[in-house]
Amino acid sequence: IGLLGIFTALLAGCSTTNSMVSDSPTNPGMTKIFYAVDINAPKTEAWKVLADFDNLSWTQGVTGARYLNEKREGLDMTRHCDLKDGGYIVERITRWKEGSGFAYSIDEASDPISTESYVIWRVMGNESRSRVSFEVHYKLKYGILGQAMNAMMARKKFSNQIVEFMGELKAHVEKRVS
């Protein structure tokens, strides 16, 4: 499952982290996974990496990313990501707050991820440390079958992928400033 690859890539090897998996309180029928990682680098450096929207070279879960429109920042910027497992995902910016975060919708995916799904990234911190959080609200396609797949495997798999991905982000940002 391709999107699982992106999410899993985020969570491994992180120190001082917060993680939570729950039913989405604002979106009934959706699952919410939240993960935050502390990074030994300025907030501005963490933001630079995330704001470079078509550059996901720092994660092994994505083999390529490219813009799908003329936008290079802000609302409606859209990227296509090729995933390590052969799948793909198309993400479109729906909220943008320069220097501190953005949200994107999942407009299309090779996975059974519903297009109702979305992700929120936040960057907090100061000149020496930052905290980056990743929050996904997702729903699987296929009705009851999708719910069963989520309960039996997807939740755990997505959570593990997010841990790995966030560990890669932390290592990449810290390496840039060392």
Image: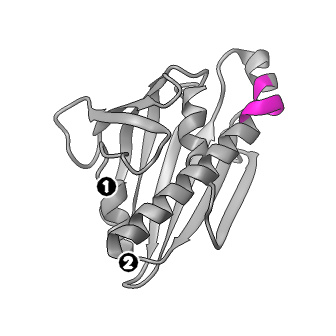
Q: Position of residue 108 (x, y in %)?
A: 45, 23
The quadrant of the picture occupied by the C terminus is bottom left
Q: Amino acid type of disc 1?
A: Ala
Residue placed under numbered mark 1 in the picture = 51
Helix, strand or loop status at disc 1: helix
Of 92 and 29, the residue lying toward us: 92
Helix, strand or loop status at disc 2: loop
Q: Amino acid type of disc 2?
A: Pro
Main SS of the magenta segment?
A: helix
Q: Position of residue 100 (x, y in %)?
A: 38, 65
Q: Is residue 147 above or below residue 97?
A: above
Residue located 34% across and 53% down the image:
96
Q: Position of residue 158 (x, y in %)?
A: 66, 40
Residue located 55% across and 32% down the image:
3
Residue located 63% across and 71% down the image:
15
Q: Is residue 74 above or below residue 31?
A: below
- Left or right side of 93 for 141: right
Q: Position of residue 154 (x, y in %)?
A: 72, 32
Residue located 83% across and 30% down the image:
152
Which residues, given as a range, are shown in magenta?
Answer: 149-154
What is the CA distance from the residue labelled 1 to the residue labelled 2? 14 Å
Residue 28 can be seen, yes or no: no
Q: Which mark is residue 42?
A: 2
- Left or right side of 128 for 79: left
Q: Identify the mark nearer the N-term, 1 or 2.
A: 2
Of 28 and 151, the residue lying toward us: 151
Q: Which mark is residue 11?
A: none
